[in-house]
């Protein structure tokens, strides 16, 4: 026994020495060395291309950037060696130049503040993740833009389109109705649900609850995946109370059709496959709503739903009756099976309103819809998302689906949840919005950006337009509200993108034209499907519009040109002829603009411009078209002052046949 | 060394008392084996000191920096990861082997007169090993450390009357923060090494002295051979331990979870594995009985064993038939202790409810 260990001694000594060598080897043999050697060769190669024998001196070893303000030490540069060297733009990873290094210097930002991952790690797997015991894995390219919001806010329209889209979708689709996000107001996205019995048909409501997208593919209402019985229960609950006020209205359907078509409803509503998407599709609306409801909606949509985007047209009751009468006879669902509809009505009749009430409460319908009878304003039944972007992965349950470890990341969980909300488990409440991959990525990006973490003030740089709280008071404010002008037009940064920006309208067009156009709008841009609807603008209203435009919606850039324009001889026939020549020959404006039916359709029609545009405006616009409208497709020519004078004179001159 | 001398004394013992004795049931091979556990533990203690001092060169006991230093050790400091692995695995090995050493002494009834004091010293050494392991557990300042310590301080707080005060004193506050880390660090790198090395010295000296008391006729180390032989032999054993530890450190990395975060509670939070039995026990009933009374009575009993059990037969061999009751009681205790740890480690999920290891845990 004693001899045994003594004999073993040399062997043990040798073995321990070998293991010691093993330790040294394991410590020395870091994978980053291979990258650094490769990079050194590449540097030498680049140097030889420029005629030098050797590249700059390259020191093998770890590289670390300590960003004190962000409390981060990033060692990514140990392998990502070409980060700041523009010559490596097309080099393979890990040497590729960072595409946005100019704005985001490695010096100031490091890597992980935007990209996540483990900055302190020096092996590929540990640094990129996902690894056990390090929560933040490197962001997938799809979701990368979420980090922009950390410093730049959420309204980064041009540089972070995915984030911007996600941000808009989050509030448009009413996510905020169930999920709290600190500092963000709740948005009520759905109509009020009181007096539903008066408004919609029982079988339609049943089908709607069963599958909203079947009736209206563009709806924002999600699919709650109700069973037949559940849908009937909820419908029964919502239909409690008074029933419809009459099943028809008397009117002349033929006249109604003409009124409907000339009123340009298609600007917002799709009818028979054509039209805008601001409002719902109307081809089957009479299978949904009772005629009195249609009547009331057209007469005053705001009385039924204060947030409705539909303007008050100001039709006479007779006209509305005609329109409704036409809709009742023509806009019905032809595929609807009478027997099936009868069955559905019966199903709703036999259903239990109490169970329906429970379901309505449980599904949090109040998050998007107001005025649900007997249900209190609560909402926000989903988890608080204020800091969900940095949620710990251990709190997220992948449940029934088998996800390999490398995909068990926070972005992946959010993506799956948004794409198919009940994928993880039976009995989850979140409804299915049927988002496509692109939409899901956008929402995921936005939610990932909700970090609730503040970066030092020196890092914040808000980009993009924040929504303004432009809300004029008085007569003009009431007009804006009545005609819902801001659904299509934008004023001072608020409003839609369907029609042109009106912020400088007062400087742009003539007084008489505003008044005439408000009374009887004609076509300015022949190519556009969306046209200004012919509202029944009352007499004091057009004056108020004009006054407001002329005093408030003006820009000094145009107004200050009055003196310049007064020195121009815009009525001189010689100059007009010169302008006409430039228009047709040198600049070929007629490629896009039309005069008396001749010319292109891209730009506005110039036939009657002498009645519409102010000369100051034309001068201003020709100087720099993009200053007025960034997305203008007008080519920027360097016109001389003389040419501008001539072109202005021609454009605002009366055109002859 | 302790083991060898003991073995030696037994041989002498037999020579003086040649009373016929039934051979134990287990094979002859095991009969008088001591496995050199004392020496192994001392080897581990040396490895722990050497690697510990090297780690100390980098470590900063500051809640903001500690975790980052460990990450540095893992990723950029030469030999950092490997020495940390060695330190961690040696510490865990030492806890197990000190316990085995103690069990060996009990089964062979070597705590009896005149070795009562050495048994007590050995027991104190075992407690010191646990304290050193526990304080070291907190130093990386990761989730495992933070929440393990939280559990331990809550166990402390469950003591009657003085509980909350005790927790306050140990943590240097009402919650785990900089003060707790500083205290753990000082205890781990100053107090415990000092106490343990002093006690090891006393343990060894007393062992030798007790051998002589028990066997007045014993002189020298005739059976052990010359000094150089002894040194070669013991050094060979040390090398063997070193080899095992180096091998383990090359193959297996010491765990390091995410940085301590009081707002993210692991589900469930578990004590360090060597105190997991205590946490498991605590879940059975009133903390006063299960966390305070039972463990302390057991501990007190362990200290008093040599003064209670003063039998004359069955010393120096494994599982002697005349000590059946003692051995059964002790084996039962060991089984329950290990069972509790295994139960706590593998069969407990959220809310400390029972789950089979293959059963998924509900997260919400």
Image (tube, coloured by chain):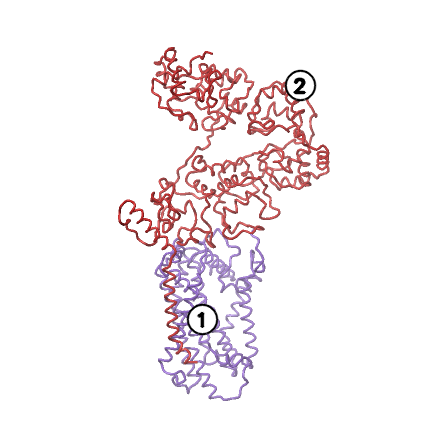
Q: Is residue A585 above or below residue B54?
A: above
Q: How many marks?
A: 2
Q: Is residue B114 above or below residue A264?
A: below
Along the line of sight, which residue is nearer the eye, B161 or B110?
B110
Chain drawn in red: A
Within-10-Å neighbours for mark 2: few <14, some 14–19, many 20+: some
Q: Classify residue B219 by image quadrant.
A: bottom left
Q: Chain of mark 2?
A: A
Report x, y in % for residue A587.
39, 21
Report x, y in % for residue A223.
61, 39
Give the residue at mark 1.
B124
Along the line of sight, which residue is nearer the eye, A383 or A309?
A309
Q: Quadrant of the N terminus of chain B?
A: bottom left
Report x, y in % for residue A59.
30, 53
Along the line of sight, which residue is nearer the eye, B342 or A169?
A169
Asked if residue A187 can be seen in this view, the reply is yes
Q: Is residue A330 above or below residue A41?
A: above
The CA span between labels 1 and 2 is 104 Å
Q: In this rendering, which labeled residue sits more in front, label 1 or label 2?
A: 2
Q: Which mark is residue A161?
A: none
Give the residue at mark 2.
A252
Q: Are marks 1 and 2 in contact (CB under 8 Å)?
A: no
Q: Which structural element holds mark 1?
A: helix
Task: Give the residue at the far left of this rendering.
Answer: A52
Chain drawn in purple: B
Report x, y in % for residue A435.
55, 39
Residue beneath the point at 69% across and 24% down: A248
Q: Which structural element holds mark 2?
A: loop
- Left or right: residue A319 compared with residue A11: right
- Left or right: residue A395 compared with residue A34: right
Within-10-Å neighbours for mark 1: few <14, some 14–19, many 20+: some
């Amino acid at each position: 026994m004693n001899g045994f260990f003594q004999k073993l001694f040399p062997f043990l000594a040798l073995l321990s020495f070998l293991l010691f060598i093993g330790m040294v080897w394991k410590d020395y043999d870091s994978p980053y060395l291979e990258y650094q050697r490769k990079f050194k060769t590449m540097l030498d190669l680049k140097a030889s291309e420029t005629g030098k024998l050797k590249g700059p001196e390259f020191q093998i070893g770890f590289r670390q950037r300590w960003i004190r303000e962000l409390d981060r030490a990033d060692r990514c540069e140990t392998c990502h060696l070409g980060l700041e060297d523009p010559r490596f733009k097309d080099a393979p990873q890990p040497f590729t130049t960072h595409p946005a290094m100019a704005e985001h210097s490695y010096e100031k930002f490091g890597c992980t503040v935007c990209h996540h991952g483990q900055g302190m790690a020096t092996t590929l797997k540990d640094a990129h993740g996902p690894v056990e015991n390090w929560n933040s894995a490197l962001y997938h390219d799809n979701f990368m833009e979420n980090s922009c919001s950390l410093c730049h806010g959420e309204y980064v329209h041009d540089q972070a389109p995915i984030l911007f889209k996600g941000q808009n979708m989050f509030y448009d689709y009413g996510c905020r109705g169930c999920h709290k996000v600190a500092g963000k107001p709740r948005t009520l996205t759905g109509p009020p649900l009181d007096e539903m019995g008066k408004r919609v048909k029982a079988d339609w409501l049943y089908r709607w609850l069963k599958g909203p997208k079947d009736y209206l593919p563009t709806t924002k209402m999600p699919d709650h995946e109700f069973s037949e019985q559940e849908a009937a229960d909820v419908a029964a609950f919502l239909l409690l109370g008074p029933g419809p006020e009459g099943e028809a209205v008397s009117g002349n359907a033929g006249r109604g059709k003409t009124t409907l078509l000339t009123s340009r409803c298609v600007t917002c509503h799709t009818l028979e496959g054509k039209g805008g998407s601001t409002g719902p599709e109307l081809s089957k609306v009479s299978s949904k709503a009772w005629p009195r409801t249609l009547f009331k909606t057209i007469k005053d949509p705001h009385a039924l739903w204060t947030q409705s985007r539909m303007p008050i047209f100001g039709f006479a009751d007779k006209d509305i009756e005609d329109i409704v009468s036409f809709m009742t006879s023509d806009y019905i669902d032809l595929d609807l099976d009478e027997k099936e509809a009868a069955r559905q009505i019966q199903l709703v009749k036999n259903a239990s309103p109490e169970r329906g009430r429970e379901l309505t409460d449980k599904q949090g319908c109040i998050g998007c819809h107001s005025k649900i009878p007997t249900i209190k304003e609560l909402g926000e039944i989903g988890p608080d998302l204020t800091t969900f972007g940095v949620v710990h992965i251990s709190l997220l349950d992948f449940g029934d689906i088998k996800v390999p470890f490398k995909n068990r990341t926070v972005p992946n969980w959010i993506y799956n949840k948004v794409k198919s909300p009940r994928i993880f488990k039976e009995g989850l409440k979140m409804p299915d919005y049927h988002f496509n991959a692109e939409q899901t990525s956008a929402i995921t990006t936005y939610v990932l950006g909700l970090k609730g973490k503040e970066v030092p003030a020196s890092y914040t740089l808000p980009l993009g337009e924040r929504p303004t709280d432009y809300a004029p008071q008085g007569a003009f404010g009431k007009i804006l509200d009545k005609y819902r002008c801001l659904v299509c037009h934008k004023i001072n940064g608020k409003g839609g993108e369907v029609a042109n920006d009106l912020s400088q309208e007062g400087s742009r067009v003539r007084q008489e034209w505003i008044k005439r156009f408000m009374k009887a709008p004609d076509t300015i841009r022949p190519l556009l499907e969306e046209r200004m609807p012919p509202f029944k603008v009352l007499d004091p209203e057009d004056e108020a519009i004009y006054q407001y435009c002329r005093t408030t919606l003006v820009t000094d850039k145009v107004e200050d040109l009055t003196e310049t324009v007064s020195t121009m001889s815009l009525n001189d026939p010689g100059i007009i002829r010169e302008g006409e020549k430039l228009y047709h020959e040198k600049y070929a404006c007629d490629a896009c603009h039309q005069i008396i039916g001749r010319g292109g359709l891209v730009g506005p029609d110039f036939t009657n411009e002498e009645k519409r545009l102010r000369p100051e405006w034309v001068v201003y616009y020709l100087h720099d078209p993009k200053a007025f409208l960034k997305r203008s497709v007008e080519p920027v020519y360097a016109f001389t002052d003389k040419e501008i004078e001539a072109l202005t004179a021609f454009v605002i001159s009366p055109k002859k046949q | 060394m302790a083991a060898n001398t003991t073995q030696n004394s037994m041989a002498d013992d037999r020579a003086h008392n040649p009373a016929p004795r039934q051979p134990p049931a287990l094979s002859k091979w095991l009969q008088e084996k001591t496995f050199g556990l004392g020496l192994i533990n001392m080897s581990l203690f040396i490895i722990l000191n050497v690697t510990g001092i090297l780690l100390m060169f980098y470590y900063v006991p500051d809640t903001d920096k500690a975790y980052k230093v460990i990450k540095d050790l893992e990723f950029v400091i030469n030999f950092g990861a490997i020495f940390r692995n060695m330190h961690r695995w040696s510490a865990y090995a030492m806890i197990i082997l000190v316990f085995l050493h103690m069990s060996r002494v009990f089964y062979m009834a070597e705590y009896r007169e005149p070795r009562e004091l050495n048994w007590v010293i050995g027991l104190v050494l075992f407690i010191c090993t646990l304290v050193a392991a526990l304080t070291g557990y907190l130093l990386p300042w990761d989730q495992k450390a933070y929440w393990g310590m939280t559990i331990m301080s809550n166990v402390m707080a469950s003591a009657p009357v003085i509980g909350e005060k005790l927790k306050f004193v140990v943590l240097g506050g009402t919650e785990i923060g900089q003060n707790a880390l500083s205290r753990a660090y000082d205890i781990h790198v100053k107090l415990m090494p000092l106490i343990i090395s002093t006690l090891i010295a006393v343990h060894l000296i007393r062992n030798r002295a007790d051998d002589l008391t028990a066997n007045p006729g014993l002189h020298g180390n005739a059976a052990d051979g010359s000094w150089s032989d002894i040194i070669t032999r013991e050094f060979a054993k040390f090398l063997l331990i070193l080899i095992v530890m180096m091998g383990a450190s090359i193959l297996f990395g010491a765990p390091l979870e995410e940085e301590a975060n009081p707002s993210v509670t692991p589900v469930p939070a578990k004590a360090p594995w060597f105190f997991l039995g205590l946490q498991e026990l605590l879940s059975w009933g009133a903390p006063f009985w299960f966390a305070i009374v039972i463990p302390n009575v057991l501990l007190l009993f362990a200290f008093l064993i040599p003064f209670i059990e003063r039998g004359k037969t069955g010393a120096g061999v494994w599982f002697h038939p005349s000590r059946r009751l003692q051995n059964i009681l002790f084996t039962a205790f060991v089984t329950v202790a290990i069972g509790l740890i295994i139960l706590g480690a593998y069969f407990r999920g959220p809310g400390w409810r029972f789950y089979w290891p293959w059963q998924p845990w509900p997260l919400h």
